[in-house]
Image: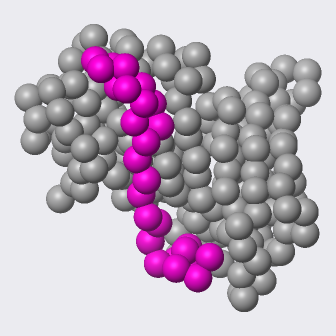
Amino acid sequence: MVHIYYQDAHIVVAEKPAGLLSVPGRAPENHDSLTSRLQAQFDAIYVVHRLDMDTSGLMVFARTKAAQSHLSRQFQQRVVGKTYLAVCQDHIEEPAGVIDQPLRCDWPNRPRQIIDSVQGRAALTRWERLQLREDGHTLVRLEPHTGRAHQLRVHMQWLGHPILGDPFYHPTPDAAPRLMLHAWQLGFLHPASGHWMVFSSPPDEFFGMESA
């Protein structure tokens, strides 16, 4: 069952659970995805962006080619507002900051990404501490200005506070029940009306937002 936040003749805004692919994989056993589930429900669904399989949260899909082009341009031109929640290792003493570290693929260890000041592509993340948790970790808000693969995950590792449950960038990923990264808020211009739309998705109970 797909949780749909909004739908009309042009777009669908839905929630991707952690552990579900955004789009179908090549192998038959990887066909199940948020895209394939929506395609079974709607006459046409077009992909605009993706979330990592282990990341939960909001995604917008187009229902027409025109809407797909319009939304894709917004992502390319960085018009879209994206805000994530993450639970990061240990207490972060600083209240907020900006991480400006270029990224590239670590080809021998794909799909891992690494920071590379020479060959990397520009990547910028703004972060804000929301709560010092009783379990010794920190709830943070993350806003990626760019959209590089694994950007938030690598940047928080670089800061010295990797995201809990991260199988690539946390030294003990089994310390959390899942990757503690959630696409919390998504804002964009409606491809037909031009109106600014913002959607919010509450994270699951592991994030402890009720006490934040």
Is 32 displayed left or right of 205 in the figure? left
Its colouring scheme is one colour
> What residue lies at 30% left-to-right and 20% top-to-bottom?
193
Q: Position of residue 163 (x, y in %)?
A: 69, 62
Compared to residue 146, the image places residue 210 above or below, namely: below
Q: Nearer the viewer, residue 42 or 176?
A: 42
Left or right: 56 in relation to 175: left
Counting from the top left corner in percent of width and height, residue 132 is at 76, 77
Residue 87 lies in quadrant: bottom right
The image shows residue 84, relative to residue 191, as above or below, that is below
**Residue sitting nearer the eye, 72 or 210:** 210
Tell me the quadrant of the picture where the C terminus can be found: bottom right
Question: Does residue 182 lie above or below 110 as drawn?
Answer: below
Task: Please tell me which residue is depicted at 17% across the width and 59% down the height of the picture.
Answer: 1
The magenta-colored residue range is 187-212
User: Within the magenta stretch, is there residue 195?
Assistant: yes
State the image coordinates of residue 158 (x, y, percent, origin top left): 85, 50
Residue shown at 37% from the left, 26% from the top: 195
- Would you say 172 lies left or right of 55 here? right
Q: Is residue 206 visible?
A: yes
Q: Quadrant of residue 167?
A: bottom right
Q: Quadrant of residue 128?
A: bottom right
Instruction: Give the tally of numbered discs.
Output: 0
- Could you say where residue 27 lies in the image, as x and y percent from the top left? 31, 39
98 magenta-colored: no
* Vertical relation: 76 (above or below) 105: above
Residue in the picture at 86% in, 30% down: 116
Foreground residue, 155 or 32? 155
The reply to whether residue 55 is visible in this rendering is: no
